[in-house]
Image (cartoon, rainbow, N blue to C red):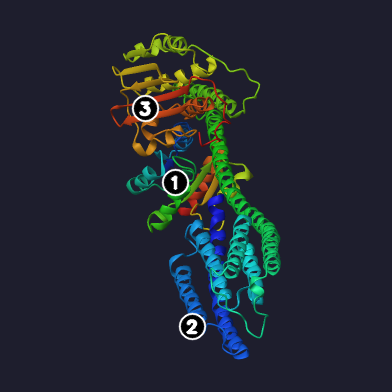
Amino acid sequence: MAKILIVDDDPDFVETTRLVLESAGHTVVSAADGDEGLRMVAQEKPDLVILDIIMKTVLDGLHMSRQMAEDPEKRQIPILMVTSIANTDYAALFPTDEYIHINGFISKPISPQDLLARTEALLDRRA
Amino acid sequence: MSELLHIPVNRELSERARWLVSLRWIVLALAAAMILAANWWLGNILPAKALWATVAAMAVYNGIFWVVAHRLIGPGAPYQLHEILLHAQILADLVALTVLLHYSGGLENPFSTYYVLLVAVGSVLMTKRASLLYAAVASILWVGLLVAEATGFLPHYNLVGFRLPMRYREVGHILAESFVLVTANFGVSFLSADVSERLREGERQLYEANVSCELRSEELARLNERLRELDNSRSDFIRLVTHELRAPVAAIQSYLRLILDGYVPPERLQEIVSKAEQRARDQLDLISDLLDFAHLQDVPSAQAKPEFTDAAKVLSDVLDMFQARIEDKKLNVHTRVEEGLPQAPLSTEHMKQIWINLISNAIKYTPEGGSITVELRREGDHLYGAVSDTGIGIHPEEMERIFEAFYRTEEAKAIARHGTGLGLSIFKGIVERYGGKVGLESTVGKGSTFSFTLPLAPQGVPVSTAPGAG
């Protein structure tokens, strides 16, 4: 199966996501912030990155996705962006007129079925 | 305000001084023409040498005034210098006119009315007091000349063929001439000074109104900027609260969902449920901290009675509360509390929150076997309290941010995962609410000292700080 990197500073989110993904037979690695996430991408070469937007700094996740987009090798890895911000009031926070290098967007809390469906879809597309 | 006002007033005085100098060149040309015309018409009866010498002297002093007005006293010079320059010009002109009149017939010369002209010019340019001075000087010079010539103290030059000789000695004529010129001088000085003073007052008010408008618009721009900052920090705060409030509930919900959907193997069930329970406890802590924090934002009512508490007693209660944790970590706690301290000017509840926040942090971030020192003493008219630890310390660049709501250093997160990041902002909020100041000294790896000073005399309770800024 696939190797998936979870980047989130909330260990409980990492834990729950890990349980679901491992139940489907995937290997899971994790990082707590954008910098560590970039190192893990280089080191572990995951097939998919699940990335939280808000970590150490607001929009840390967006920053990491941009960094990945600038690297010819890393940009091949699909990104599923996760956030607990689901309110349209905050839509204005996010850059709208520039390209965000992500392949999907999902909001917390995530139902296990939904998470598996989304990750499978992204992994299939890559394959 | 008066500093600002002087600048345009000085500029105007300096322009007036230059204008008088320019005008005088024209007057000198006219005077020369008059001397030539009079001598031609009356047949060289006047002392031409003396008259030309006077005109030349005037040209010389006008040249000096020109240099002074254009080169030495610029618009930026002090107000008094401008005034002196104008006084000097008018007074020199009054004297020069008297000399010219003396050599050209004295009382017989109709140009004596030019005194009135000079007084009028001086009165328009200068203050009321100065204009009365000009009127007095003009009158004294004129009457003095008439008397000096009539009594033979000065020679009299008769305008032969223009006026009857001997008239300059007729008392009635001298009195009439004196009376007309003196009253004309004072009348003109009073009227023109009064009118121009009113005009100047109007101008001054207009200028002041302008200046205060400018000041007000600057003030408005500053306030606007401040409001924008407040608005930004408020939306940052809302964004963080939304994130912080949702995250634990989302985590608990995810754990429960996994259990319900059978993703959790039976042997891990206990572990997963206790993780969810821990998260629920965190959420409760966060909510109670947020309520404290929100309560600090309330503007205290003006009628609220000042409250007092015994800071030392509250401290010993709080230390008792933490006794078990202190023993668990084998920490040495030293207290240095001054005897007989006056009552601290804040509510018992707030004093308790201050001690709890500082001491629980010290316990949390100090390794086993470390020590904590609590100090409480009077410093002048302030109460000084401090909690020092031998803990992890704080990087200098993080010292400012440490008091921000939700801010936790990476080292703090590594040591204690659970923490709301609100404790220090609550501490700062309380201290500032009572007009006090917080302090922080820290060395990474050595420890930190958080301190506060509270004014002992109760004073106006300021509006609390903005969210996020605290």
SS at mark 1 in the image: strand
| Disc 2 versus disc 3: nearer the observer | 2
> Which disc is residue A49 wearing?
1
Viewer-proximal residue among B112 and B206: B112
| Disc 1 versus disc 2: nearer the observer | 2
Separation of disc 2 and disc 3 at Cα? 106 Å
For residue A3, above or below residue B64? above
Q: Are marks 1 and 2 on the same chain?
A: no
- What residue sits right under mark 2 in the picture? B49
- What residue sits right under mark 3 in the picture? B415
Q: Name the quadrant of the N terminus of chain A.
A: top left
Which chain does the numbered disc 3 sit on?
A: B
- Residue B130 point in image, percent of width and height: 59, 58
Numbered marks: total: 3
The type of residue carrying mark 1 is Val
Asked if the residue under mark 2 is in contact with the one under mark 1, i.e. CB atoms within 8 Å, the reply is no
Q: Quadrant of residue B107?
A: bottom right
| Disc 3 versus disc 1: nearer the observer | 3
The type of residue carrying mark 2 is Lys
For image coordinates 48% across by 49% down, the residue present is A62
The residue carrying pointer 1 sits among few (fewer than 14), some (14 to 19) or many (20 or more) residues within 10 Å by Cα, namely many
